[in-house]
């Protein structure tokens, strides 16, 4: 069992909250600020931050799936 | 129990579960739809580019996993803190141990004929049917919602007249300089922007201005702000005239918290009470309220965010951090307004209280956000003596602490 992060890029509004919440997992493109997934299978130590990012995202563009 | 099933209410419910609350969790929403996102209603959804499914904040499976007592299409009609119970429009009563109020706001309307507003999914569906080539839309109010709807409508080929009582649109929020940038964008795209005009009523064929002129349109959209949904709290003892009054913990009364558009709380970072109708605040405050509701008294944390909002109009994306309203000064600290690549900073008293950027990189904006979060004095970030507003570029240093 692990957690996979899904990023719905067309929904992203470039707010950048995910980068603040989980900088190891998310970044933003320089040109338009759209989020970039750095790690789609973050380890357990990063999960709190990723959950925070998913909950904060003002475009509901981040989803966590347990597989 | 959480009353209000939009972004703030959903964030609160999810947080309650994530933080370990495994008891009965009732989520009440007056709309029939499962939680959906509102910002796209004036943009991707209004163009028809997105459908209802894309608006959903969570999948059905994700909602199911929360194990909610979900009551949609039902409004809260009364609160009795003494018996810890909420009355609902279907005649039932729900008792609670803890309550989060997230009932949001509803659009203000104008006298005269009933016409379009834009707050709900159903509002957007009704308006979307009235847009397109050969149609004339009158938008009353050039705030962010009115301006976005005008931009979307004109993009669909609609003839749009945008009416605003202030001399410059959005000037009271973002300042006249940025307001003029936006005005120019609307005029370039063919919106008939009329400022300094006040609408007295909606008629069958358009709107009547206070000077007696009639502005005709096939459809009229009223976007003149909103009022908090607090009538159901009458008689509850809660102070709710200008939003549900809360302390820095988002608590309105023992065991009763509020979040999102409806909440007026004391933001310790800005040392002022504020009510914020931004999408980001709905999520952040929903989470904060839920955490404080569950926490032991000494473990509660004040909610002191740097507010954030964005607005998309044509190819311009505005992003802003902080509390811009009531600012004393605006300064261009980077870039050029005319080029539509710039950062402006806002001063209140001797402090940096807001920044707004268009066409700048995310790193730049994040560093300004940090400066706001640190409560940076104005003179540390903006060298005033080099600045002759409105158009000159000031020198600015963003602190890295």
Image: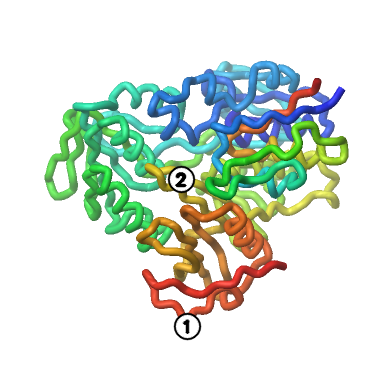
Residue at (24%, 48%) from the top-left corner? Answer: B193
Residue at which label 2 appears = B311
Q: Looking at the picture, how far across and down is residue B285, in whole percent?
A: 65, 44
How many angstroms separate mark 2 from mark 1 (CA)? 31 Å
Q: Residues within 10 Å of mark 2 (few under 14, many from 20)?
A: some
The residue tagged with tag 1: helix, strand or loop?
helix
- Say whether marks 2 and 1 touch (CB < 8 Å): no
Quadrant of res B314: top left
Q: Is B72 drawn above or below residue A22 in the view shown?
A: above
Left or right of B142? Residue A17 is: right
The residue tagged with tag 2: helix, strand or loop?
strand
Per the rendering, the mark at residue B192 is none
Q: Looking at the picture, how far across and down is residue B94, in whole percent?
A: 68, 23
Quadrant of res A42: top right
Residue at (25%, 31%) from the top-left corner? Answer: B158
Residue at which label 1 appears = B385
């Amino acid at each position: 069992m692990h957690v996979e992060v899904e990023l719905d890029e067309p929904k992203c509004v470039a707010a950048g909250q995910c980068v603040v919440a989980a900088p190891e997992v998310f970044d933003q493109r320089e040109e338009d600020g759209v989020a970039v997934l750095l790690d789609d299978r973050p380890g357990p130590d990063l999960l709190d931050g990723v959950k925070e990012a998913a909950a904060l995202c003002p475009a509901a563009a981040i989803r966590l799936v347990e597989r | 129990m959480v009353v209000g099933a939009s972004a703030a209410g959903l964030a609160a419910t999810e947080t309650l579960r994530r933080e370990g609350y495994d008891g009965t969790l009732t989520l009440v929403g007056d709309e029939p739809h499962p939680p959906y996102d509102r910002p796209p209603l004036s943009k991707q959804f209004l163009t028809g580019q997105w459908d209802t499914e894309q608006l959903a904040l969570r999948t059905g499976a994700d909602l199911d996993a929360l194990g909610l007592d979900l009551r949609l299409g039902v409004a809260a009609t009364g609160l009795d803190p003494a018996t810890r119970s909420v009355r609902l429009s279907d005649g039932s009563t729900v008792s609670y141990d803890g309550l989060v109020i997230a009932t949001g706001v509803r659009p203000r309307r104008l006298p005269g004929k009933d016409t379009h507003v834009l707050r709900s999914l159903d509002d957007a569906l009704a308006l979307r049917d009235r847009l397109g080539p050969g149609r004339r839309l009158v938008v009353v109010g050039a705030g962010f919602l009115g301006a976005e709807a005008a931009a979307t409508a004109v993009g669909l080929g609609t003839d749009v007249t945008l009416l605003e009582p202030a001399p410059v649109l959005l000037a009271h929020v973002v300042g006249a300089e940025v307001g003029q940038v936006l005005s120019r964008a609307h005029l370039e795209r063919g919106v008939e922007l009329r400022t300094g005009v006040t609408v007295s009523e909606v008629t069958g064929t358009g709107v009547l201005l206070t000077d007696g002129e009639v502005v005709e349109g096939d459809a009229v959209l009223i976007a003149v702000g909103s009022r908090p949904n607090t009538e159901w709290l009458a008689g509850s003892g809660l102070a709710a005239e200008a939003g549900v009054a809360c302390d820095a913990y988002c608590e309105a009364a023992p065991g009763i918290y509020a979040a999102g558009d409806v909440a007026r709380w004391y933001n310790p970072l800005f040392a002022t009470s504020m009510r914020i109708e931004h999408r980001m605040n709905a999520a952040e405050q929903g989470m904060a309220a839920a955490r404080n509701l569950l926490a032991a008294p000494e473990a509660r944390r004040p909610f002191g965010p740097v507010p954030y909002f964005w607005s998309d109009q044509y190819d311009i994306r505005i992003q802003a951090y902080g509390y811009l309203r009531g600012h004393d000064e605006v300064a261009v600290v980077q870039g050029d307004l005319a080029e539509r690549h710039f950062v402006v900073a806002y001063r209140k008293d001797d402090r940096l209280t807001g920044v707004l950027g268009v066409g700048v990189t995310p790193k730049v904006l994040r560093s300004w956000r940090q400066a706001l979060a640190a409560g940076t004095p104005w003179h540390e970030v903006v060298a005033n003596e080099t600045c002759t507003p409105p158009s000159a570029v000031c020198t600015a240093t963003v602190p890295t602490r």
